Structures are given as C-alpha cells and as structure tokens.
Image: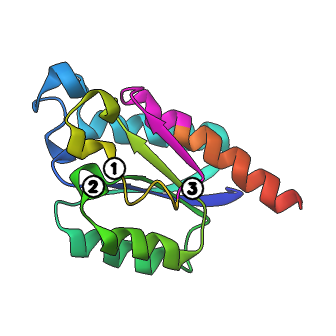
Amino acid sequence: MSFASVLVLNGPNLNLLGTREPAIYGAETLDDVARMCRDAAERLDLSLDFCQSNAEHQLIDWLHAARTKVDGVVINPAAYTHTSVAIADALSAIDKPVIEVHISNVHRREAFRHHSFVSPIAEAIIIGCGTQGYVLALERMATILKTRKAQ
C-alpha cells in the first residue's frame, strides 16, 4: 500500500505532446509521460492519478475533488500558468503541497510566459528539464510528504 497519493494534472495542449513543436517539447507523448510517472510513483511508493484537460473548469473540478483524496499535486498548467487566477485559487484552496512543472524553459521563451499565477503557491518549480521534470517533481513530492508525515 502506498504511503501517499499524488494527483498529476496537465493543462491545455499537452495531449499533443510528441507532435506539437517537438523542438521545444520533445518527442515523448503524454502517454509516455504517464508511463514515466507511474513507474516513478511505484518506485517512490506513491499512488498516482494522472489527468489532462484542455478545459480550465475540468482542471478546477479535479482540484476540488482532490481536496480530500490526495496528499499532493504536481501540475503542468501549460498556458493556464500565465492566465488563470481560477486555477491558482483552486490550488490554494486544496491546502496541499503543489509542485509546478514546465517541460520547456519558459524564461527563454516569449515574455508573456515569464509570469506564473501558480508559482507563488508552489513548494517547488521545475522548469526546462523536459519530460524528466515530472519524475523530478514526483521525487521531490515524495520527500516533502515523507518529511511532513514524520513531523
């Protein structure tokens, strides 16, 4: 039995990974990322829910449902990073540790991508590590959750 549960949320257009701008986002598909996350979760003794939606309201609904079901959230809000106060509010409302992930280095891209509504809420931010960033986020989340459980 897993010691903790983590929700991995993916925002808009991440369903196109592997075909959308591979020079920026790489060749791995979202299914590949899900598989990497499941493998990492098993190794880290975490249970995992992995979801993606292009709809802001769906991401918020999943976050609301997670309030009583998960111990932490890893989120790649994608374009909603820069636009959604609603997702930031939902993350604040669940009162769980949050790790923000971005596949590309958003600070080497267009200026509008440099601001995140999620970052002030996040315990950690992993940027520019490709899809490996998800595994790094799960590793960090496991450490955070184990530390909190020990206190």
Q: Percent position (x, y) of residue 34?
A: 36, 42
Q: Give the range drawn in magenta.
A: 122-136
Please name the residue shown 71% across and 55% down the image. Answer: 145
Residue beneath disc 1: 115
Q: In this view, does 24 lie above or below 138?
A: above
Mark 1, residues whose alpha carbon is within 10 Å: few (<14), some, or many (≥20)? few
Q: Quadrant of the C terminus?
A: bottom right
At label 1, the amino acid type is His
Residue furthest out toward the front: 111
Image coords of residue 93 (percent x, y): 50, 79
**Residues at circles 2 and 1 in contact by the CB criterion of under 8 Å:** yes
Point 53% across, 56% down: residue: 122
Q: Residue 66: x percent and y percent?
A: 48, 74
| First along the sequence among labels 3 and 1 | 3
Camera-nearest residue between 2 and 60: 60
| Residue drawn at the location 60% of the way across and 53% of the way down | 123
Label 3 and label 1: CA atoms lie apart by: 31 Å
The quadrant of the image that shows the N terminus is bottom right
Q: Which residue is drawn at 21% across and 25% down?
A: 24
Residue wearing tag 2:
82
Identified by mark 2, the residue type is His
Between the C-alphas of marks 2 and 3, the distance is 29 Å
What mark, if any, has residue 46 been given in the picture?
none
